[in-house]
Amino acid sequence: MSANKIFLRYYPPGLAVNYRTAKGCERLRHFDLLDLDTKTNIEPLADSILLQTLAEAEEDNPLDGDKTSEIPPVSGGVTNSQNTFSALKQALGKLQRKLREPIKKKFYLHKCHNSHILPLTNVCFDRSGERCLTGSYDRTCHVINTQTAEVEHILTGHDNVVFSVGFNHPHCDKIVTASFDGTAKVWSTSSGQCLCTFYGHTAELVAAEFHPLNASSIATASMDGTARIYDVETAQELQQLTHHGAEVIAARYNRDGQMLLTGSFDHTAAIWDVRSKSLCHQLRGHSAELSNCIWNFSGSLIATGSLDHTARIWDTRRLDQELHLAAKHTDEVLDVSFDAAGRLLATSSSDCTARVWNLEGSAEQLEMLSLMAGHSDEVSKVCFSPSGCMLLTASADNTARLWLTDTGMCSQVLAGHDGEVFSCAYSYSGDAILTASKDNTCRFWR
């Protein structure tokens, strides 16, 4: 075996070894290191990775090119097992040093972007943190340079609210928008030109996202009670998912894009097999509308939040009933979010609090790790910092807040908006924050 490159992923920790077999076939072997921490002994881990790679090198399958985009390259050629072992130790050491870096706990207002003329809906960063997207009730999406707050492109063409915005990660050379006009559109990030429009829904679209591996398709969720999958190249509808009995508010691919998770106002979530175009399972248990549903990174767990005041965690290996019930909120659960490694779950609620739950405790009892109390109005959005040490919340009290995940202590109040803060996001590297408000502005914090 001849190893050519080692690729790193910081959040959550992972690496991939690009190597050539004795028969000359180039291959890529991925390793998720979700349990890596600052105390991990990296020598046995490097040895285990090397042994697995050597064992697989005996086979002769070609490189799966679709997956090479997940992790950026960080090291050069390595030609034998001893050198590969040394390079693996260096790579694991780099991942560990990243975990040891001080967590940024204080942010300062960098820029305020105010080019929208109506309230903002949702926002997101690209992978580099150099650009962000903002959707708005003014029917546009803005592509903004986060360094200067200058608008690079104004994406116009929708006839109603632009509610959902997103990049095709990790390349981020395409943008998808979903609108209350019943359509989704894909745009070029560099030119701002609309590449295609997707028709077929008969009511508002509230979610759209790219296929995670190759951006060859998008999935959409609509208030017409359906989710749909479209081909990005042809704009043709590939699948119409019609089993839900009410509005569909989420449609999310799992990590390899082979399964799709949908959530609905019919009190259920559903898992679909994209390849066979079939319904695999419907998750029943909530007694009111769902507010969100998400996969963890590995796809082993699903979390659902509901207006029935609860969140539920489901093990994808046995879906007949939930694995855990998070039932300590006293009002509607408005959002749910996993940390990068999928070991923690955050929930936010109309009861003005957020809570963090430890998913690695006893299977019998879900442990609440911390309570974030301090907002004076409902908490509509919640997300972890990339390292998982901090929690970011957005609230109708016109503020966003940063909290220490372990203790629930408020680290900082991000104040200054004159209206409800509806959306918030961390950059991939964790050094920037975006808050978006119904005061028509978004703020960049560094």
Image (spheres, rainbow, N blue to C red):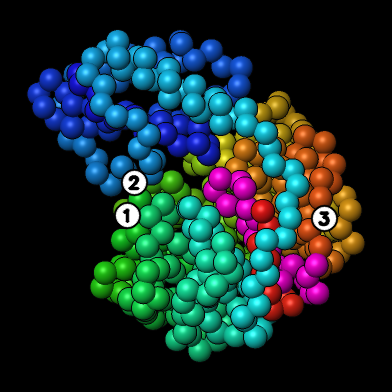
Q: Report the residue at 56% width, 63% height from top.
A: 146
Badge 3: residue crowd in 10 Å (few <14, some 14–19, many ≥20): some
Could you tell me if the residues under marks 2 and 1 are in contact, i.e. CB atoms within 8 Å?
Answer: yes
Q: Nearer the viewer, mark 3 or mark 1?
A: 3
Let me know if residue 307 appears in the view: no
Badge 1: residue crowd in 10 Å (few <14, some 14–19, many ≥20): some
The residue under label 2 is 69
Q: Report the residue at 65% width, 39% height from top.
A: 388
Q: Amino acid at mark 1?
A: Asn
Relative vertical location of residue 178 with respect to residue 347 in this rendering, above or below: below
3D distance between C-alphas at marks 2 and 3:
36 Å
- The answer to which of marks 2 and 1 sits earlier in the sequence is 2
Residue most extreme to the front = 148
Q: Report the residue at 65% width, 85% height from top.
A: 117
Percent across and percent down for residue 211 are 38, 57
- The answer to which of marks 3 and 1 sits earlier in the sequence is 1
